[in-house]
Image: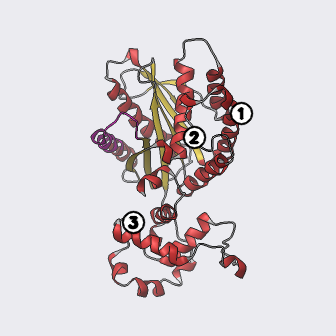
Amino acid sequence: MLISLSGGDFSKQKTKVAHILNLYPESRNSDITLTIKYWETFQPDIYSSHGILPKDLFRLERMHYIVRARAKIQNEYNLFTPNTEVKRFRRKHEEEMSEAVLEDAKPRKLVHVYADETGKTQNYVVVSSVWVLAGRAVFTVSQAITSWQKTSRWAKREAHFAKLGKQDLDTLNEYLRIIVKNREFLSFKSIAVERARTKRSIEQVVEKLHEHMLLRGAEHEIDSNRIGLPQKIEVTLDHEQSLDAITLDEIKRRINGGYAAKYGEEIEVSQIETISSRNSPLVQLSDLVAGAINRKMNNTGDKNYKDEMADLVIHMLDLQFEQDKVEGLDVSALFKI
């Protein structure tokens, strides 16, 4: 379930319920709040805070199914648990909260980052990331991609730049149009370094690129007022990336140390997870972006359809590099935010 939640895979009801519990802490204590937020998020075409037609009640997800999923998540998985008082007196607490539920429950401020790496055996090593700037937008963007994909030529395959063929150009164009339509929720950030100009091992290079992408990326989002404080950041990486669990924990601690030095306790990376890309349309998107940039920076041979595809991705998503000195790297890096 956590894999699906981290990846933005909302094909199962349990993941949808976990998404609400994660995003709205008040829903952990109130099944009414949970159900309302579930309907509001996943069935907005049916649910309205101004009133629901009797015939539409039959179309809404049944509250007892939502509550059953919540109970399994909290009691069996011990995740997103309620406070101690609610555990003991849930029914009484629900009755006492009936008036408060009428007020809009505030979501946690949560940014999701999906990242991938490429070019580890080539001239430039690249880390690219997709930043989803609001918790609810993870579902919005993921749903837009999966809904389109079901009726597209990519219905039974993942979106990976390395696997694109000549016949995929038109489909890639359609896919990118879906992303552009949801561009308001997204930010793309990439960082690259030339291997020949660093004495670090490839693992150290990748580690530093991830670290500085997250540090500088958050700084840019805050300075440009695209996100406010306080803020939590959840990071999801493709499980095929080269960093082990110990290294990821060290990266997390260093990043949070960097955040604390500038912003105090107002922002932190709360988790770094790794998942299979097949479970996440957003990890696949980060792969596509990384692959396009990798092609643009590392291809030294004759140009072909792959270069045309890379240009299409870079143009439609407005991805451009600027050279800059990044503290902590022993060479200048190409960075795009």
State yes or no: residue 331 in magenta.
no
Nearer to us: label 3 or label 1: 1
Q: Earlier in the sequence, mark 1 or mark 2?
A: 2
Which residue corresponds to the image point at 66% horizontal and 73% vertical from the top-left? 59
Whether residue 289 is situated above or below residue 249 in the rendered picture = above
How much space separates mark 1 and mark 2, taking CA atoms? 16 Å
How much space separates mark 3 and mark 1, taking CA atoms? 43 Å
CB under 8 Å between discs 3 and 1: no
x, y percent for residue 263: 40, 48
Please state which amino acid type lies under the numbered disc 1: Asp
Residue denoted by label 1: 170
Q: Earlier in the sequence, mark 3 or mark 1?
A: 3
Question: Magenta span covers which residues?
Answer: 239-255
Please state which amino acid type lies under the numbered disc 3: Phe
Q: Mark 1: which secondary structure?
A: helix
Quadrant of the image for the N terminus?
bottom left
Q: Is residue 179 visible?
A: yes
Nearer to us: label 1 or label 2: 2
Q: Mark 3: which secondary structure?
A: loop
x, y percent for residue 214: 43, 40
CB under 8 Å between discs 2 and 3: no
**Residue 80, which numbered label?**
3
Residue denoted by label 2: 157
Please state which amino acid type lies under the numbered disc 2: Arg
Crowding near the residue tagged with mark 1, few <14, some 14–19, many ≥20 C-alpha atoms within 10 Å:
few
Whether residue 129 is situated above or below residue 18 in the rendered picture = above
Which secondary structure type mostly characterizes the magenta part of the structure?
helix
Which residue corresponds to the image point at 53% horizontal and 20% vertical from the top-left? 297
Q: Earlier in the sequence, mark 2 or mark 3?
A: 3
